Image: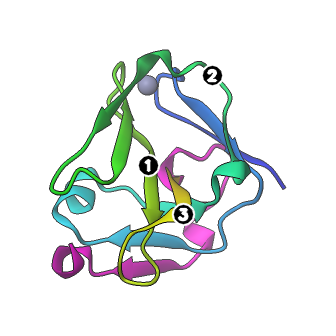
Amino acid sequence: MTVKGSCHCGATRFEVDEAPATVTRCTCTYCSKRGALWAYYRPAQFRLTAPADHAATYRWNTRTIAHHFCTVCGCSTYVETPDWSSGSADFDNPKISINTRLLDDFDLDAVPVDTIDGRNLW
Ligand SMILES: [Zn+2]
C-alpha cells in the first residue's frame, strides 16, 4: 500500500510503494543530530509528488551520500545513497532512504527500530 510523506511546510512531498516494516536509527554524527528514522527503498519504489524546487542537498565526509532537505522548513526529507549492505558502497544498487518521521497517517511507534552503528562504520 502506498504511503505518503511530506515535510513540515509541504514543499517536499513524496510517496513510496509500501509502508516500512522496520525503521533504522543511525548513530553517525549526522543522523544523530538530525534525529531521522530511515527506511530504505529502491529508486523505482519512490516518487516525488511535488516539484523539487525547495530541495537542497548536504554532503559530508566522502560526499558519497546526498542528504536532501527542505530549504523552507529545514526538514530532512530523503537520501540518495549506494547500497551499503555488503559493507562498502555498491553504486550499481542505489537506494533511497526516506525520513519516516515525515510519513503522514502512519503509526511510526508500531514498527520496530533497528539501530546501526554509523558512528563507528563511517
Ligand atoms: Zn518544507
Which residue is farthest right?
A: 1
Is residue 90 found left or right of 19 in the rendered image? Answer: left
Depth order, front residue of 71/9: 71
The amino acid type of the residue labelled 2 equals Ala
The amino acid type of the residue labelled 3 equals Asp
Quarter of the rendered image showing ligand 1: top left
Residue 82 place in picture, x, y as percent: 45, 61
Q: Quadrant of the N terminus?
A: bottom right
User: Which quadrant holds residue 87?
Assistant: bottom left
Instruction: Report the span colored magenta.
Output: 100-122
Q: Is mark 1 within 8 Å of ligand 1?
A: no
Q: Circle 2 sits on which residue?
A: 50
Q: Circle 3 sits on which residue?
A: 92
Q: Is 55 located above or below residue 25 in the figure?
A: above
Q: Is mark 2 within 8 Å of ligand 1?
A: no
Q: Circle 1 sits on which residue?
A: 79
Depth order, front residue of 63/32: 63
Among numbered discs 1 and 3, the one appearing first in the sequence: 1
Among numbered discs 3 and 2, the one appearing first in the sequence: 2
Give how far apart the Cα atoms at labels 1 and 3 are: 16 Å
Is residue 35 found left or right of 41 in the rendered image? Answer: left
Residue at the image position 48 percent from the left and 77 percent from the top = 113
Q: Residues within 10 Å of mark 1 (few under 14, many from 20)?
A: many
For marks 1 and 3, give the one nearer the viewer. Answer: 3
Which residue is farthest top?
A: 53
The answer to the question of whether label 3 and label 2 lie on touching residues, with beta carbons closer than 8 A, is no
Is residue 65 found left or right of 17 in the rendered image? Answer: left
Depth order, front residue of 106/122: 122
Residue 74 place in picture, x, y as percent: 32, 30
User: Which quadrant holds residue 81?
Assistant: bottom left
Secondary structure of residue under mark 2? loop
The amino acid type of the residue labelled 1 equals Val
